[in-house]
Amino acid sequence: MSTDIKVPTLGESVTEATVAKWFKQVGDSVAADEPLVELETDKVTVEVPAPAAGVLSDIAAKVGDTVGVGAVLGAIGAGSGAPAKKPEAAAPAAPTPAATVPPKPVAGPAPIQPAAASKGDIASPAAAKLMADNNLSSVSGTGKDGRVTKGDVLNTLASPAPAPSAQASAPRAPRAEDPREERVRMTRLRKRIAERLKEAQNTAAMLTTFNEVDMTALNAARAQYKDGFEKKHGVKLGFMSFFVKACVTALKEWPAVNAEIDGDDLVYKNFYDIGVAVGTPNGLVVPVVRDCDKLTFAEVEKTIGDYGKKARDGKLAIDDMTGGTFTISNGGVYGSLMSTPILNPPQSGILGMHKTQMRPMVMPDGKIEARPMMYLALSYDHRVIDGREAVSFLVRVKECIEDPQRILLDM
């Protein structure tokens, strides 16, 4: 008796996946709950465990196949088999030679028959001969009862031929392969990222407003408390917890930035689930830190740290990235000095952090000092958020970072 290996429920709104890798081969021994196959969805990579112990007796879905929820991937039979070999990178199966079939003769072009241009109108003998000689299939007639005359044919020949439409044009020949190039099929995650980014550009009235923040006070606070913070909480005190908390303070004051469009309605969110963009080898993912207004700085840092590790290991679950009311993206970790982040639909706002760089600044007393400065960018959907709200939100974030005590005092 065999046990089917089926595609599990993949999460909200995810109905299909691509088979990325098999960890076993047919005939290998399998232990219960041992990872058998890796599936790649639009959002995450999922490992499917063995439903029972035995021998992998059949692989029904090959690497690269698209499978739906509940589809059979393979089967496990009773008994014991050979020990599993180290999984190798899957390569496309070599095509089996097809039976030799004699080529069919290619028919030549059918002769063009002269015909009247409209409603079966009759052409004069001279016009019909001229049409045949010039391969004209139809000509508009101006003679009596719509008869095509020799003059009609001559006028048609004298008129320039209309340019072929884009749809009627012949398909472009495939580009020749260059040995210096490498062609790689897009992963489902990469295709989904492309779709969502293009969706944001096509649907949202997206604008970006900029400001700059002096990081002096925040740097001093981290330097003063980072050792004690890590000793007590077991996690480093980073920048992200301050920015998450600063955004929560600003979102409470400007709720439109935490809203989204649903049909003809504006939905204002009275909770603060902040997405934190994380770069991985497979693409950008945005896990969500839930109820940030209720979390301590240490809890925010721990959650972000856990998400970062899970993202690097490919262990993020669908639920980790579902929802979110606002997003923060830190391009500064890659050295970006300024950028315009793209919205994460259906959210209406995203904050872009950037590299901290020493710059000369004119202080209130007129003196010029070198200060650690960071550019901030807020991209927002102008359908939901007005310029006054967007700029005021960003100013509030700036104030909280330049004076971190405002966060603790909710000011």
Image (tube, rainbow, N blue to C red):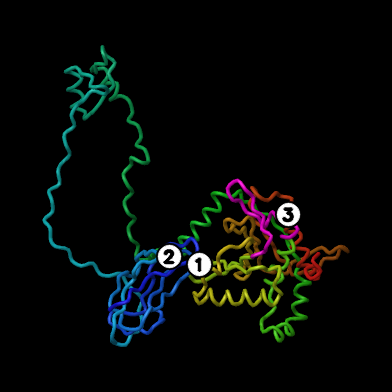
Q: Which mark is residue 283?
A: 1
Point out residue 98 in the picture as x, y percentages from the top left corner.
Answer: 17, 63
Magenta segment range? Answer: 251-273
Q: Which mark is residue 187?
A: 2
Answer with the quarter of the image where residue 338 lies: bottom right
Mark 3 crowdedness (10 Å alpha carbons): few <14, some 14-19, many ≥20: some
Q: Secondary structure at mark 3?
A: helix
Q: Secondary structure at mark 1?
A: strand
The amino acid marked with disc number 3 is: Val
Q: Which mark is residue 274?
A: none
Residue 35 position (above or below residue 339): below
Identify the residue at image location x=37%, y=79%: 23
Quick one: quadrant of the C terminus?
Answer: bottom right
The amino acid marked with disc number 1 is: Gly
Mark 2 crowdedness (10 Å alpha carbons): few <14, some 14-19, many ≥20: some
Determine the CA span between mark 2 and mark 1.
9 Å
Answer with the quarter of the image where residue 144 lies: top left
Point out residue 180 in the picture as x, y percentages from the top left corner.
Answer: 37, 66
Identify the residue at image location x=32%, y=85%: 29
Q: Is residue 51 visible?
A: yes
Residue sitting nearer the eye, 233 or 161: 233
